[in-house]
Amino acid sequence: MPKVAIVKGTNAVETTVKALETIGTDVNSVLSRKKPVLIKPNYINSKHPSTGITTDGRVIEGVVKFLKALKVEDIIIGEGSGFADTMEAFQVAGVDAVAKRWNVKLVDLNKDEFVVVKPQNPLSLTRVRVAKTAVASTIISVPKLKPHRMATVSLSLKNMMGALASKGLMHRGILSENIVDLASVLKPSIAVIDGIIAGEGHETSGNSVTMNLVIAGTDPVAVDAVGAVVMGISPTDVKHLILAEKKKLGTCNLKEITVLGEPIEKVRRRFSRSLSSSLLTVTFEKINQLQPRVLRQIRSSRD
């Protein structure tokens, strides 16, 4: 059974270290000394982490501190922001200072070399251009704890969109299927959810919620499932988690997950969600269902 740690504390760096130490045996089994480690935060924009939108630099520092204690030296902090200059986002979050303090590399994945990868048995994405750094690394995904208007949650699997050459590609077709296909080729080996100052409403609403939590594990599907439940969202309502489990990328069945540290019941809080969330989900699902039919009609009209 996969293990997921939930650790609560007011010192974000040490809380992160403790969360990773709690699953230390699992972490040791997935780290490779032959590959660099990519710490992948979520900087969809350059808002300060206190808004509940972007990854806290202190959580990033906790991950780096933990890795350094294990004598891991080849560490990269990399992200490709969707709506901001990535380096500016790093600076606002204090990540540039973390990189300098611990002597680790800082990479804007938007300016990386891109390579084409092809998911096996794809649900939707047959090929996609991704940052070469991500492909060549052991990935630690460090998202913010927050809901999402279209994907229901924005956690470790969805966070891998930042490694894409074209983020907009994910919104062509069915988003949940695209997330899973991307995760099948860029699967995080470790997921660390920053729930120090979480965000409710939606992914960029800026409605911050102080939770003082870090959630971590080596099964990203299980970690995301626990993160969803902590926000009061059932994993069965998160389509990409259900699909990820079917593709054997991990489990989202809480009965098959061992939770260490804080019990879910003790830290769970029902996050408010924007009214547009359900409307967008239903609307885009209907559009995606209609796409094949519309395309067939267009082709037949041309014949």
Image (cartoon, rainbow, N blue to C red):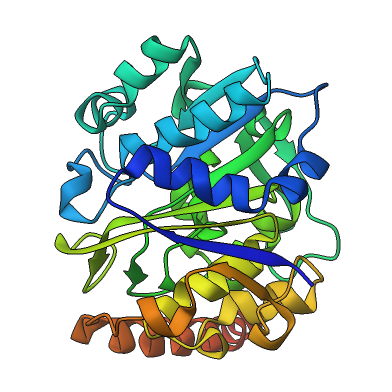
Location of the N terminus (image quadrant):
bottom right
- Give the number of callouts: 0
Q: Quadrant of residue 184?
A: bottom right
Residue appearing at x 16%, y 53% in the figure: 51
Residue appearing at x 25%, y 36% in the figure: 84
Task: Give above or below for 193 relative to 286.
Answer: above
Compare residues 183 and 38 and report the one nearer the observer: 38
Location of the C terminus (image quadrant):
bottom right
- 31 on left or right of 263: right
Residue 260 placed where, x, y %? 60, 67
Task: Give above or below for 220 relative to 12.
Answer: below
Residue 181 placed where, x, y %? 69, 61
- 54 on left or right of 171: left
Compare residues 246 and 60 and report the one nearer the observer: 60
Task: Give above or below for 136 relative to 215.
Answer: above
Q: Quadrant of residue 30?
A: top right
Residue 231 placed where, x, y %? 36, 78
Judge whether residue 205 can be spotted in this image. Answer: yes
Compare residues 17 and 56 and report the one nearer the observer: 17
Residue appearing at x 59%, y 84% in the figure: 301
- 139 on left or right of 175: right
Residue 278 placed where, x, y %? 32, 88
Judge whether residue 114 can be spotted in this image. Answer: no
